[in-house]
Image (cartoon, rainbow, N blue to C red):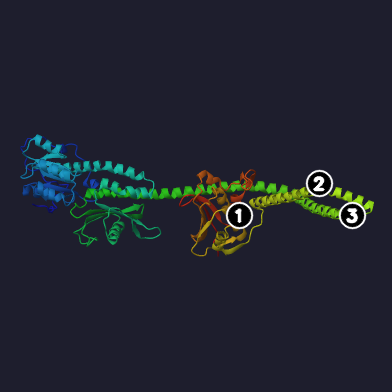
Amino acid sequence: MEMSPMVHSPEASAEEPARPWETSAGGLPASRGSSSLPRRSVQELTPGGGISVLVIDDEPDMREMLAFSLPSNEFEVVTADGGRAAVEVLGTRRFDVAITDLKMPGMNGVETVAALRELDPDMEVIVATGYASLETALACMKHGAYDYIRKPYDIAELRHLILRAVEKRRLRSLVPLYEVSCALLSLRTRSEVLAHLGELALDLVPHQAFRLLLPEPGTDELSIVASTDGLEVPAGALRELARRSIQGQEPVCGVNSSRDWPFSPVDRVGSALAYSLQVGDAPAGSLILLRGVGQPVFSVSELQRGSLFAAQLALALETARLNGELEARVKDLEATREELVKAEKLATVGRLAAGVTHELSNPLAFTKASLQALTSYSQDVKSLWTTAREVAEALSGREEPGLAELAKKLLTAAGQETEYSIRDAEEAAGDAMEGMRRVEALLTELRALSGGGPIAPTERMDLVPLLTAWMREDLLTRPLQVEATAPVFAKVGRNDLESSLARILAFLCEATPSKSGVRPGPLIIRAGYENGRPVVQIEDPLLGLSEARRAEIFDPHIQVDSRSGQTMRLNFGLALAWRLLRRMGADLKVSPGASGGSAFRLVLPAAE
């Protein structure tokens, strides 16, 4: 059995093909390859190398003649002395075209065609015959042969027939390539590309395993994307193959027997094919396909299909990266829009608050002064009433008629009805002063909301003691759970920060009231750093907020007064907390919690 490639004579070339041998008397019509010859050159069909041809014939002279006659600069010829030998050769490598004799001992041409097509459905098979009938040749084609040719060979006709077969194979491979390209480019995210990469590559280039190496952000190092095939392959060998393909900007094919095989002493990998992933002039990683020992090495046509797939993969990864950046920018724009809408809402409320504050300040001052005077008067009247009662009681014991009469009048004037009136006036004055204090508090909030309130001076402070103080004092209707492993320093206005945190905690306590006397679970407060800035996150596992509710949560709103359960009151709590935090350079957002519920996230200015 002969399987080694033949060395061709330099005299035989594409420009001067060998003359045809004697004409056969087999009586077969001319093959279809003799008409409408292809116009593509070998370089156009196989830009990555020559066409590989497996010649199968039991006659040594015929094998040597074909190996000598087919131009060596266009064709790589390997010979086999029969069908069984061809099957053995095909178990170690792949070919673009096979030329098999029809009448051979052991395994005839029909059986050989069927066996070769079963081993490699992509390989085209040309049947050569000088003795069999048309029916026998057509039977070979029925089993998958591309065409037949008469013996002795017309080398020019054979050459064009091989080119036609390769052209057909190339065109046939464009269909799955197109389908794979469409599938790749339809994937929008990197995770989707990585999830479907193996099956898409397998559709074009059969392989046992693959590895994808992508550059680490900001470095020249290549990281190996995790694989689920369970095949342990040395990372150093993968990076070496990737380096060769990237530096040469062309595919690198290695086999276990080569001197520069990087996978030694690993004996389970038989061949590897590495592609450079290019985006413009910049390398974007490497794709490596692997086959095990005993499997055929990668053929030239597989190398070419893989090159096209690698180009599509690089484009898909770049598209996914751009999609990711675009989605991130869209999210940033949406967040910015929400912030602007929120700021505009609060600015409108602030302008209204400034106007209301201005209009109410002077009348409130006069009313407060009058109420203070009324309170003082009621106290004076009460003192006068008490004195009159005491004088009347003292005069009623005298014997003089005039004094007794005077005592009687005093007792009448300072009687029980007068006492009730004085008490009612005193309570009314107290209620009025309490209402006045509530109005003053409301005006203070309006003034702060409008930006007209005083700005608290900033200081460097540790946030952890402030948070744990609330936990220890147990001032809220819900317990607190503070998680902080070290001090967290921020530069903030203490009063504004305390007021903002108190408003957030009060909102969370009111939003999830206790049921049937059972105290709800704790609010979880986590303090730490993120990107160099102090962060406080208050998470409520019980509070679920819809997206629409989260969007309007910082708007001022009217709610039922929880203390009375009947009256309505204006709630500036979270709106004012947002305003106070923003003016000290902090940010406040609400988002779904990591374990369910909702989380309020405060990003504070860093301490110097």
Of callouts 1 and 3, which one flags the residue occurring earlier in the amino acid sequence? 3
Counting other residues with Cα less than 10 Å from the Cα at mark 1, is it few (<14), some (14-19), or many (20 or more)? many
For residue 395, the mark is 3
Residue identifier under label 2: 417
Q: Residue at x 24, y 46 (%)?
A: 44
Q: Left or right: 346 with respect to 311? A: right
The residue tagged with tag 1: helix, strand or loop?
helix
Q: Of residues 53 and 389, which is closer to you in this image?
A: 389
Asked if residue 505 can be seen in this view, the reply is: yes
Nearer the observer: mark 1 or 2; the answer is 2
Q: Please state which amino acid type lies under the numbered disc 2.
A: Glu
Q: Of residues 516 and 246, which is closer to you in this image?
A: 516
Query: Which percent across, then down, holds residue 451?
Result: 64, 52
The residue tagged with tag 3: helix, strand or loop?
helix
Mark 1 vs mark 2, CA separation in Å: 52 Å
Residue identifier under label 1: 580
Q: Quadrant of residue 247?
A: bottom left
